[in-house]
Every structure is written in C-alpha cells, then in structure tokens.
Image: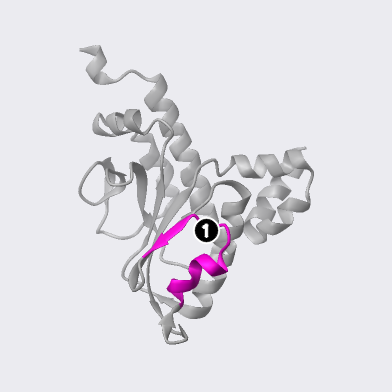
Amino acid sequence: MRNAYANVRGLMRIDPLQILNLDQHLVDYAASLWPADTGIEFEISAISLMNGIPRNMFFDQELPFLVAYSGIYSEVRFRIPKGIKGMITLHQLCGILTKYYKLNMDSGLHYHIQPKSYELVKIAVSEQRLDFMLKELESWKYSGHYNLKKISISGNPWIRYNTTYDTLECRIGEMTFDYALIHDRITHFQKLVRMANNVAINSPSLGNCI
C-alpha cells in the first residue's frame, strides 16, 4: 500500500488526469493532499495574441475547472480548485503559459491558501505561534533578499497573512512555469496551512493566558 501511495504522488507530478483511472481510495488520497483552493500570482507578459487580444482573456474558456482569475497584463492571479480538479487545472495552465507567455524573472510566484479557521490563524500569526513554517520552508532554498524570513500581517515576509483575501500567502515561490515544481510547492504549502490551522485551534492564544 505504501508503494501505491508513492506511485500516486508520482502521477500527481507528471499527469494528474491519469489519477482518475485508479481505484477510488487512491483518488481520494490524492485529493486529500490538496484540501483547499489555491491562489497563484504570476508576473508575466504575452508573447502571442489571440485575435489581437492577450490570451488571458480566454482562460475561463480554456480551463473548465478554473475557479477565478484576474488581471490581463503583468500580474495575473488564478484561483484553482482543490483536489484532483485543481491539479488538472494547474497542469493545463502551465502548458498554456509555457506556450504563450514569458516570465518576469525579477519576481517570484506567490501562493495563497485560506485556512479553515482563518480568524484563529490570523491571531496565531500576530502572536508568532506559526514560526515552525519558516523551518519547513528552508527546503525551498529561497535566495532572494526582498522577502524577509518571518511570518507577519504586513510588509514583505516569507509568509504573510493577507487581510484582503484572509489567506496565508507564501511569497517565496520560484518564478517558473514548470508544473512539477509548482505542484510540489502547492502540496507542501497545503500541508503547512493544515498544520497552521491545527496549531491555531489546539494551542491557546497568548491573550487567553494573561
């Protein structure tokens, strides 16, 4: 069974559409690794137009599972669904972006995930109870200097509680269209957001200890 789960994780990185051909318990396992929608911010510019219009205008037609998107030029934001549909959407999106767009290599990808108990998570961020996430993110080997190694509600930290969307926003993603790498980053950040949610629920607020 352990090998079966490893094979599923391998398929997730290569062609998530193939997961739908597996036994249902393996499909459910794969879906459980992405339990929430993910927002992704790209800084891109079009290298090809569709009828004289940037292809961004047609993303909802080309990506049937896409939840939402905004932006036409420069910074474009996508919200992809949870579970297998999200992985399939990301796989399709990366193909479109690779073919028709170029990256702003002076920037980086931002990932947004909303915790279930986001109000409690916001308090945990303000009380610095989620610093374990920074240790986990060291494996991403962020080499930039713009974002600081901290978690906060403002400024340019590695992780910011985004008050506009009530999401945890990871700001140190590599600027890439590589599906496997983006998949790995989302899978890891999904795990960290679940952990943050559990900490926020199960560990007492410092304010309640006074």
Q: Quadrant of residue 30?
A: top right
> Which residue sits at x=33%, y=28%?
120
Name the kind of residue labelled 1 in the image: Leu
**Quadrant of the image containing the N terminus:** top right
Query: In x, y percent, where is residue 152?
Result: 25, 41
In the image, the segment drawn in magenta is: 55-70
- Tell me the residue that label 1 is attached to: 66
Residue in the foreground of this view, choosing between 165 and 151: 165
Query: In x, y percent, where is residue 112?
Result: 40, 49
Dot 1 falls on a residue whose secondary structure is loop
> Which residue sits at x=45%, y=84%?
49
> Which residue sits at x=61%, y=53%?
85
Does residue 49 belong to the magenta stretch? no
Decide if residue 29 is in sight here: yes
> Which residue sits at x=64%, y=54%?
12
**How are the residues colored?**
one colour
Left or right of 119, for residue 184: right
Query: In x, y percent, where is residue 72?
Result: 36, 72
Does residue 63 belong to the magenta stretch? yes
Query: In x, y percent, where is residue 210?
Result: 20, 12
Residue lying at the far top of the rendered structure? 210
Residue lying at the far bottom of the rendered structure? 52
Q: Quadrant of residue 56?
A: bottom left
Left or right of 90, for residue 132: left
Decide if residue 78 is in sight here: no
Left or right of 115, for residue 124: left
Residue in the foreground of this view, choosing between 166 and 61: 61
Q: Residues within 10 Å of mark 1 (few under 14, many from 20)?
A: many
| Residue 151 drawn above or below residue 90 | above
Residue in the foreground of this view, choosing between 49 and 134: 49
